[in-house]
Image: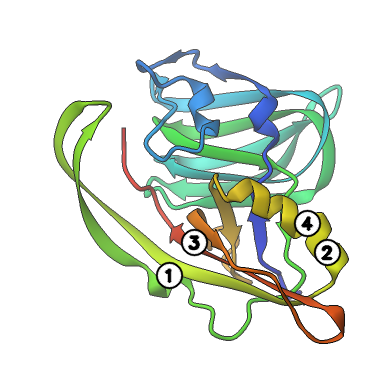
Amino acid sequence: MPEVFPRLGWASVLDDATLSANPTDFAAESAVVNIRDGRAWSFWQPLPAGPVELIADLPGPRTTTYAALAGHDAAGAITVEIWTGSTWQVAASTTADGSGAVRYLTWPPAVTTRLRFRFDHLSFLSTLLAGEDLILPEGLAPGWSDPDLAQRPKLNAEISRGGVWLGARVEFWDATLTLNLKRLTPGWVRTYWRPFQRACATRPFVLHWHQTDWPDSACLCTNADFGESAFSTNGFIDVSVSFTAELGRRGTP
C-alpha cells in the first residue's frame, strides 16, 4: 500500500459559491450558508430531516480534490459529485454512523463549476469545506500524538447561546497537538505554507493524518498557533503549528 501523506483542507470553494439545498426549508436562523461561517455553534438544519442534497454553484471553474465535514449527525452514505458540463459524476463517497465523527473525502484533481453533496440522512451540519487541499511533503515525524490516543473528555457548562439560557452541559472530545514539518524548501513554504498560515490564524481547518482508515482519521482544527519559521541546514526551513483537534461534533443545535 503506498504511503498516504497527511493532508490539510483549508481553502474552500464554498466560501464564494451560491448554495442551494433540497429540502429548501430550514429551522429558524439555520440556513445552509451557516456551513461556511467557521463557527462550531452555527448550523444548517434542513427541514424535514432525512435524505438531503446540497448544490454549490461556483463563480467559475475551480480545481477540487477534497471535501470535509464536521459537526454533523449524518448517517448512511455521504456522496460528493462534480458537474462535468453535462452530467453529475461521483468524485468520492463514504459512510457515517450518526456519531458525528469528522469525515474527509479525496479524489484526483478535477476542475468543475458545480459540486453536489448527497446525504442519506442529515438533520444538522455545522462545517463543510471543499476545494483543493494541501498534501504535506512528508509523513508525520516521531513524537506525533494520534488524536485517537490523545483525546480527552471535557465537560463544559453551556450557560447561554445568543443570550438564551440553555441549562445544559456539553461533552466533547479534543486533543491539543503540534504538527512539525522540517527541511522544507523556501519555495514550498512561500507557495503553500504561508497562504495556509495567513488564512488559518483566524479560521478552522481539517487535518487528515493517518495512513490507513481513510477517511476516518480526520479532525477539525481550531485555535491554531503558528510557530516561528526557523532556517535549518543548507537553507531549508522548519515550520510548525499547534492546534486543538476535535474528532467529533462539539455540540448540537
CB atoms at circles 1 and 2 under 8 Å apart? no
- The amino acid type found where label 1 is placed reads Asp
Q: Are marks 4 and 2 in contact (CB under 8 Å)?
A: yes
Find residue 84 and report its horizontal and vertical position in percent. Answer: 84, 29
> Is label 1 or label 4 in front?
4
Residue beneath the point at 40% across and 75% down: 149
Count of number-bearing discs: 4
Q: CA distance from mark 1 to mark 3?
A: 15 Å
Q: Amino acid at mark 3?
A: Phe
Residue mark closest to the camera, 1 vs 3: 3
Callout 4 secondary element: helix
Location of residue 85 in the rendering, given as x and y in whole percent from the top left corner: 86, 24
The residue pinned by badge 1 equals 148
Contact (CB < 8 A) between labels 3 and 2? no
According to the picture, the residue beneath numbered tag 2 turns out to be 188
Residue occupying image coordinates x 40% and y 53%:
248
- First in sequence, mark 1 or 3: give its number: 1
Tag 4 residue: 192
Instruction: Place residue 244 in its image quadrant.
Output: bottom left
Marks 4 and 3 sit apart, C-alpha to C-alpha, by 18 Å
Residue, disc 3: 243
Number of other residues with Cα within 10 Å of mark 2, as a class: few under 14, some 14 to 19, many 20 or more: few
Picture quarter with the N terminus: bottom right
Toward the top, the furthest residue is: 25
Residue at the far left: name it. Answer: 167
Q: Is residue 172 left or right of residue 9?
A: left
Say which quadrant the C terminus sits in.
top left
**Label whose residue precedes the other's in the sequence (3 or 2):** 2
